[in-house]
């Protein structure tokens, strides 16, 4: 294998996407230690990419995140080593927004609790979208698509929530976006106090880690629900379990958890108002094809043509030509 040809893909990807890497030697297993010195590019969905791995791969030029989140990649270490990190913003937005919409409806109709109890009269009366307030934490491509879908389905009260410490320019941008979408804007705790469902759509960063903590959950309207199709670490799982056990939160529908899959012995597994799925929001053939195609283009741009990739997460000095 030539150094210039090796692309390591440690996680399962859609097979059709590999056609875009014609001419590269693609290695799809966990043999990184054996091939590290030959690796020029990595495409990772969830496998952690550490500084130590980068040091073991002196010819590594680009790490392409198969999705939007890059919390499993040491971006700072990559930047210091002159390695591009890219992601695929917006390319799985339709798939994730669709599942989030479905989970919001499940929460409003108390499906997680009904599936466990399975007896008439033991489950609270459900609500339609039209009579509900849905708060969205995150106004990126997924949050915006979800807001449009909610409005089209008759949800008149869609609110974008923002952390109280968010700077004023960002709040102004959020107000402009929400006005276009026919949605409202409220500080997070105010939104929690009025919403029937809080749906999370934020990346996991040092600023968002544990953002939905006990104080936020205590601020929520009694009997409200939480939906998370973003990243598990944004939500304090112990605080969520406490809120469910005390009955202040009615339902939680989670497509992501801090540890995936969620261990069988975890507290949340024992609670009747909880539904957990194994991070499937982006798992559609259309989404995976588009995401893999974008990752392949990043690899080709950097490794074959020496160009700056289309969706860089970090900033490197300009490539000289």
Image: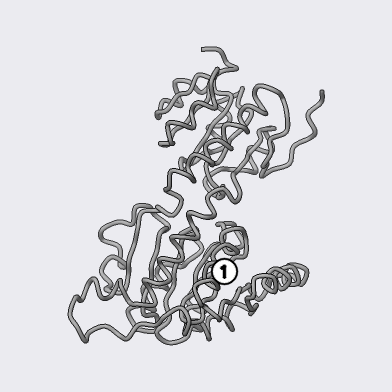
Describe residue 257's horizontal placement relative to residue 7 as left or right.
Answer: left
**Eyeballing the image, is 9 above or below 127?**
above
Query: Which residue is found at the position 63% from the left and 76% from the top?
Result: 183
Residue with the mark numbered 1: 147
Q: In this view, does 12 lie above or below 151?
A: above
Given residues 246 and 193, the one toward you in this image is: 193
Q: The C terminus appears in which quarter of the rendering? A: top right
Disc 1, SS? helix
Q: In which quarter of the image is residue 244?
A: bottom left
Name the residue at the left extreme. 119
Residue 4, given in percent of the width and then of the height, sits at: 60, 17
Of the pair 284 and 169, the residue shown nearer to us: 284
Q: Nearer the viewer, residue 48 or 8?
A: 8
Residue at far top of view: 1
Residue under the point 40% across and 36% down: 12
Q: Where residue 71 sits: x, y (%)?
A: 55, 49
Report the coloring of the rendering: one colour
Q: Which residue is drawn at 34% across and 52% down?
A: 261
Report the side of 45 relative to 259 (left or right): right
Question: Hey, which quadrant is residue 245 in on the image?
Answer: bottom left
The residue carrying pointer 1 sits among few (fewer than 14), some (14 to 19) or many (20 or more) residues within 10 Å by Cα, namely many
Q: Is residue 275 left or right of residue 210?
A: left
- Residue 34: x and y in percent read 44, 20
Residue depicted at x 59% and y 57%: 205
Q: Is residue 181 above or below residue 128?
A: above
């Amino acid at each position: 294998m030539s150094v210039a040809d090796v692309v390591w893909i440690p996680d399962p990807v859609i097979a059709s996407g590999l056609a875009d890497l014609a001419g590269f030697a693609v290695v799809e297993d966990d043999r990184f230690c054996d091939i590290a010195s030959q690796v020029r590019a990595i495409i990772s969905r969830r496998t952690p990419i550490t500084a130590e791995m980068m040091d073991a791969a002196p010819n590594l030029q680009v790490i392409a995140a198969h999705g939007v989140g890059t919390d499993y990649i040491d971006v700072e270490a990559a930047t210091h080593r002159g390695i591009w990190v890219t992601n695929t913003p917006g390319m799985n937005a339709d798939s994730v927004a669709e599942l989030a919409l479905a989970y919001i409806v499940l929460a409003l109709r108390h499906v997680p609790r009904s599936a466990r109890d399975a007896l008439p009269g033991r489950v609270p009366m459900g609500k339609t979208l039209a009579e509900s307030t849905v708060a969205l934490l995150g106004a990126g491509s997924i949050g915006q698509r979800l807001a449009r879908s909610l409005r089209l389905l008759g949800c008149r009260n869609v609110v974008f929530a923002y952390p109280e410490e968010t700077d004023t320019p960002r709040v102004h941008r959020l107000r402009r976006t929400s006005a276009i979408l026919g949605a409202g804007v409220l500080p997070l705790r105010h939104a929690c106090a009025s919403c029937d469902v809080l749906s999370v759509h934020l990346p996991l960063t040092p600023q968002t880690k544990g953002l939905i903590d006990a104080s936020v959950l205590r601020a929520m309207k009694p009997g409200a629900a939480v939906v998370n199709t973003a990243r598990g670490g944004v939500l304090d799982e112990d605080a969520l379990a406490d809120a469910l056990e005390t009955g202040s939160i009615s339902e939680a529908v989670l497509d992501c958890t801090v540890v995936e899959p969620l261990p069988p012995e975890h507290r949340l597994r024992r609670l009747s108002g909880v539904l957990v799925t194994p991070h499937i929001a982006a798992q559609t053939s259309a989404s995976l094809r588009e995401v893999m195609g974008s990752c392949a283009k990043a690899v080709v741009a950097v490794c074959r043509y020496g160009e700056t990739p289309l969706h860089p997460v970090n900033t490197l000095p300009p490539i000289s030509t």
